[in-house]
Amino acid sequence: MIEASVNALPGVTVFFLVLAVLVGPPAALWARARGRSALLASAAAVLLAGALAVTLAPGRNTAPVERVCATGTSLHGALQTVPGQLNAVIFLFPCLLLVLATRRPLTSLGVTCLVVPGVEAAQALLPLGRSCTFIDLGLNCLGAGAGWGAGALLLVVRDRAGAFPRSEVVRGAAFTAGGALAVLALFHSAITPVAGLSDGQDLTPAQADWARATSTALFGPQARVINVQQTPQLGEQPLRIAVYTDKGRTELDWDHRRIFSAESYDHQGTRGSLNVRQLRAWAAEFGSRWFPGQTRGLQPRVEPLGPGNGPVLASYRRYRHHVLMPMRLDFTLARNGNLMALTTRFASDPALPAPRLSRAEAQRRAEAASGRTAVGPGFLLAEQVGGLWRPLWLVNVGTGGRAERAVRVDAVTGAVVVPDPPRDY
């Protein structure tokens, strides 16, 4: 939010000055009429105007209203970056001075509950060219809460019993509860949470440096990093970092320091003179460098993707007791040795019960269950069924000698099963 305001928003200063003129003098007049400090009131109003100007000034490219708010990543990671710290501080001092100027802590809390989340709601619901993110909302609320808490504590120390008179407790509590419920209802009814990439502000310097170094090493020192983004961590999913360069993009796993996927944008000059043997040696060197734990003791299989001197697919697979393990590593190479694409699936070799069902019996059961004829020999592979790893026979079935679908048969029980969707981590 802060970087977008400083670097990309036109007229933030003008917007701030207009707001300051509109709210500063009235705040001072209100304070004088009630025997409060005009200086504190005008300062609180001006600081609040600054925060609103930074967060609500329209962007250069006004986007259509999408009514969505992106899930963030972690407050801890965001607070280790300068933009994240600024997002946390931006509402801290306005809320602190608001409590001291009004001497109404609970009423001030109600104003905070409306204004701070209202900023992100406005970014989601109005055509401002801004994006709503829950990480920004969390940072803003964290700073606002700290400011309000410090102001309330100062009031208690200064006024003691007079800091929370009965009238303020009743009216302020009702106003705060009403404001909080109104904001919750607005977010629940009008704004849809979506999982999306963050702008990278949650990355620590070490994470960002490693991501950039890995991407430039993958695509070459001439690759220029354009953007670094972070995906939300969902469940047990490791922290993923997407790096975009002018040569291609990579998706990285920070927790294990490895590459999830890569794609080259530069497909020019994909033809070359390297033969399959040379490409296999290149693939073996590439695998041992970037994936030593997954490729140790394995040799890549290299096969052309089409006729002629076009790209080839290099694949790594691992077998245990004739059962194909869940690990996958595939990369597409041009004949000149350039990487075109890379996909991975990381999984440890699971402990499996010994298969009992023969291939012939598995094919018979697959044919009976599908009403089709087996096409080609079946093979054993490890997949999860109901969250448990099982050895399964995979049998392709179809008509006229053409495979139409794959049937899985449990190699222990003989039951026809449907495996769980595969995970790439």
Image (tube, rainbow, N blue to C red):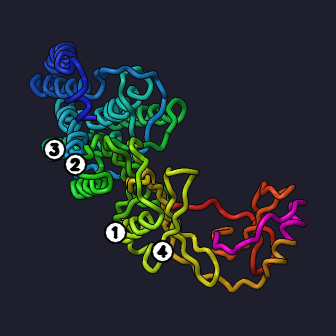
Image side of residue 188 versus residue 251, left or right: right
| Pointer 2 local density, CA inside 10 Å: few below 14, some 14–19, many at least 20 | some
Between marks 2 and 1, how big is the CA–CA gap? 31 Å
- In 3D space, how far apart are the residues under numbered discs 3 and 2 (Cα atoms)? 29 Å
Q: Is residue 372 magenta?
A: yes
Task: Work out whether residue 395 or residue 252 is closer to the camera in this orientation and state it.
Answer: 395
Tell me if residue 162 can be seen: no
- The tag earlier along the polypeptide, 1 or 4, is 1
What span is in magenta? 365-383
Q: Kindly indicate the quadrant of the structure image that contains residue 278.
A: bottom left
Q: Earlier in the sequence, mark 4 or mark 2?
A: 2
Q: Element type at marker 2?
A: loop
**Of the pair 73 and 380, the residue shown nearer to us:** 380
Q: Which of marks 2 and 1 is nearer the N terminus?
A: 2
Measured Cα–Cα span from mark 1 to mark 4: 14 Å
Provide the residue designation for mark 4: 299
Residue 289's disc number = 1
Of circles 3 and 4, which is in front? 4
Query: Looking at the image, is mark 1 or mark 4 nearer the viewer?
Result: 4
Which residue type does callout 1 highlight? Arg
Q: Which of marks 4 and 3 precedes in the sequence? A: 3
Binning the other alpha carbons within 10 Å of mark 3 as few (below 14), some (14 to 19) or many (20 upward) gives: some
**Residue 154, numbered circle:** 3
Q: Which residue is drawn at 52% across and 35% down?
A: 192
**Crowd tier of the residue under label 1, counting other residues whose Cα lies within 10 Å: few below 14, some 14–19, many 20 or above:** few
Q: What residue type is labelled 2?
A: Thr
User: Left of 76 or right of it: where is 293?
Assistant: right
Q: In which quarter of the image is residue 119?
A: top left
Please give the name of the residue rendered at 38% of the width and 35% of the height, measured from the top-left corner.
Answer: 176
Task: Check disc 3 and give the amino acid type.
Answer: Leu
Is label 1 in a helix, a strand or a loop?
helix
User: Which residue lies at the image location 15% right of the left edge and 14% below the top edge?
Assistant: 25
